[in-house]
Image (tube, rainbow, N blue to C red):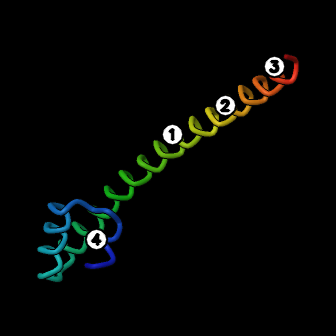
């Protein structure tokens, strides 16, 4: 259970997952697997969103570097 908690699963989902672990049968194993599959989809979506955010940050860095270079050139010219 501790390892699943480390994945960032919500407390309510962790509780549901934990309740399913108390009775080991095929139905509960399938439900736990489904919970993990849904959680994986959520994590992958968050990962894509974070990658997009990082790309925007990197674009901003390039813009700032260009601005700094232009300002240095302007300063040299004056």
Could you say which disc has been placed on residue 5 in the image? 4
Left or right: 20 in relation to 63: left
Residue under pointer 1: 53
**Quadrant the N terminus occupies:** bottom left
**Quadrant the C terminus occupies:** top right
| Vertical position of residue 27 compared to residue 63: above or below | below
Q: Are marks 3 and 1 in contact (CB under 8 Å)?
A: no
SS type, badge 4: helix
Q: Position of residue 62 (x, y in %)?
A: 70, 34
Sooner in the amino-acid sequence: mark 4 or mark 3: 4
Q: Nearer the viewer, mark 3 or mark 1?
A: 3
Q: Nearer the viewer, mark 1 or mark 4?
A: 1
Residue under pointer 2: 64
Residue under pointer 3: 74
Sooner in the amino-acid sequence: mark 2 or mark 1: 1
Q: CA distance from mark 3 to mark 1?
A: 32 Å
């Amino acid at each position: 259970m501790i390892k699943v908690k480390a994945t960032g699963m919500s407390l309510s989902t962790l509780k549901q997952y934990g309740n399913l672990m108390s009775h080991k049968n095929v139905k509960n194993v399938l439900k736990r697997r489904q919970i993990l599959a849904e959680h994986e989809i959520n994590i992958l979506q968050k990962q894509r969103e974070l990658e997009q955010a990082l790309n925007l940050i990197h674009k901003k860095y390039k813009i700032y570097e260009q601005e700094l270079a232009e300002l240095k050139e302007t300063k040299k010219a004056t």
